[in-house]
């Protein structure tokens, strides 16, 4: 049922609109108050039944209709159509590296770098791109570039020009490189434990200050070291005292060179004993003197070990504020015990023997 307040409001508005209308069309006649109320009632019922009134029931003035909804895609849902050729000015640059002019392309272990030829603010050439593995493919704009390829300790650099028109042929860079594997023995054929042996590789060229350029350090035995072809100065350290051997070794392009260096040294175990072959006495301090009298090694313990180059030495043992010593000789490849006796007379006899 339509409320009376709504009917009265509509009738008053309807009456006012008829009285103040500007149209020249004739007004519909109302014979009596009953016909007038009938018209008002019909108009009220029509408005009450409309959807607009149903959404605003209880209000004499319905809210204005809402704007129609527009189905727009979300902003983050916009996906531009990808350009299949974002920069048509880029050219394909394909690179291969070989160990020799006639050798096959290296398939792994390469590191490629592309540099701009124009130095940056720090004075260095800006690095533009890198690639690792075997052959490399880059997309570069027209202009000049420096291409550097590294294979272990071997490397090569080349300047290329990417043309504005046409394509650039595949670039093949010759590393002129081989490999070196180092090992060493003591004496003629005594194996040296790998943990006691290291190698350093230097350039064969001597600089003005008498030094050589270091190529690689702390190289372990049986390690494959890739190098440019040429002669290298090898320094081998056995132990950490004075067993050092130097050698010059030639590396050939496309080949693996295996070199075994012969150390003229031996590994010794020092013991302070009360009698020959007896048990080593603990808490002993040791000093090893070269034939010149210089101290070349010091240690503490019941039976420390030391590697010494062949030659004559003096072992001095200190225990409980007493000193004991013995002269001894080192022969290459002869690993042995050096016993120092507490009994000086026995020690003298032992040294003479």
Image (tube, rainbow, N blue to C red):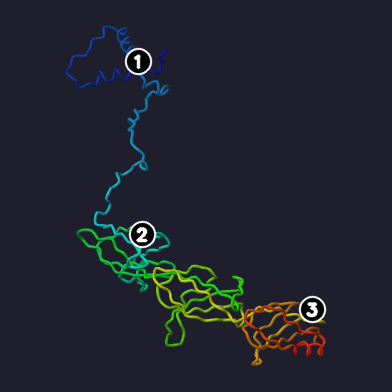
Q: If you read the primary sequence from the N terminus, does the residue marked by circle 3 or circle 2 appear first?
A: 2
Residue 160, percent from left and from top: 28, 67
**Quarter of the image where one finds residue 256:** bottom left
- Badge 1 marks a residue whose secondary structure is helix
Asked if residue 211 is positioned above or below residue 199 in the image, the reply reads below
Q: Which residue is mark 1?
A: 44
Closest to the camera, between mark 3 and mark 2, is 3
Residue 133, percent from left and from top: 41, 59
**Quarter of the image where one finds residue 231:** bottom left
Quadrant of the drawing holding the C terminus? bottom right
Asked if residue 142 is positioned above or below residue 284 in the image, the reply reads above
Residue 178, percent from left and from top: 42, 69
| 200, 50: nearer the viewer | 200
How would you rate the neighbour count of disc 2 (Cα within 10 Å): few for under 14, some for 14-19, many for 20 or more? some
Residue drawn at x 34%, y 42% as measured from the top left:
78
Q: Which residue is mark 2?
A: 135
Tags 3 and 1 in contact by the CB under 8 Å rule?
A: no
Q: Is residue 181 left or right of residue 229?
A: right
How would you rate the neighbour count of disc 3 (Cα within 10 Å): few for under 14, some for 14-19, many for 20 or more? few
> Which residue is situated farthest in the left direction here?
24
Q: If you read the primary sequence from the N terminus, does the residue marked by circle 1 or circle 2 appear first?
A: 1
Residue 316, percent from left and from top: 73, 87
Residue drawn at x 43%, y 74% as measured from the top left:
251
| 208, 82: nearer the viewer | 208
| 264, 130: nearer the viewer | 264
Q: Is residue 18 left or right of residue 152?
A: left
Asked if residue 196 is positioned above or below residue 142 in the image, the reply reads below
Q: Which residue is mark 3?
A: 277
Q: Is residue 260 left or right of residue 38?
A: right
């Amino acid at each position: 049922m339509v409320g009376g307040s709504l009917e009265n409001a509509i009738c008053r508005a309807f009456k006012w609109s008829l009285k103040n209308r500007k149209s020249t069309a004739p007004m519909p006649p109302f014979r009596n108050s009953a016909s007038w109320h009938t018209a008002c009632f019909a108009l009220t019922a029509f408005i009450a039944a409309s959807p607009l009134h149903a959404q605003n029931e209880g209000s004499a003035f319905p809210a204005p209709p809402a704007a129609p909804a527009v189905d727009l895609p979300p902003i983050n849902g916009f996906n531009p159509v990808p350009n299949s050729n974002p920069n048509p000015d880029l050219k394909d640059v394909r690179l291969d590296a070989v160990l020799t002019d006639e050798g096959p392309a290296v398939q792994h272990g390469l590191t490629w770098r592309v540099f701009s030829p124009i130095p940056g603010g720090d004075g260095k050439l800006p690095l533009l791109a890198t690639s690792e593995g075997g052959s490399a493919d880059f997309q570069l704009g027209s202009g000049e570039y420096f291409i550097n390829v590294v294979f272990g300790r071997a490397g090569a650099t080349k300047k290329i020009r990417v043309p504005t028109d046409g394509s650039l042929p595949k670039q093949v860079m010759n590393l002129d490189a081989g490999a070196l594997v180092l090992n060493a023995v003591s004496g003629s054929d005594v194996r040296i434990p790998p943990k006691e042996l290291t190698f350093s590789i230097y350039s064969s060229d001597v600089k003005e200050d008498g030094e050589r350029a270091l190529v690689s350090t702390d190289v372990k035995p049986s390690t494959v070291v890739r190098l440019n072809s040429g002669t290298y100065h090898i320094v081998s350290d056995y132990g950490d005292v004075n067993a050092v051997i130097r050698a010059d070794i030639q590396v050939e392009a496309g080949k693996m060179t295996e070199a075994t260096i012969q150390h003229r040294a031996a590994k010794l175990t020092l013991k302070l004993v009360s009698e020959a072959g007896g048990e080593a006495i603990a808490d002993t301090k040791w000093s090893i003197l070269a034939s010149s009298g210089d101290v070349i090694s010091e240690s503490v313990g019941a039976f420390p070990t030391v590697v010494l180059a062949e030659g004559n030495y003096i072992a001095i043992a200190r225990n409980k504020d007493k000193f004991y010593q013995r002269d001894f000789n080192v022969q290459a490849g002869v690993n042995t015990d050096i016993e120092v006796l507490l009994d000086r007379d026995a020690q003298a006899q032992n040294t003479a023997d």
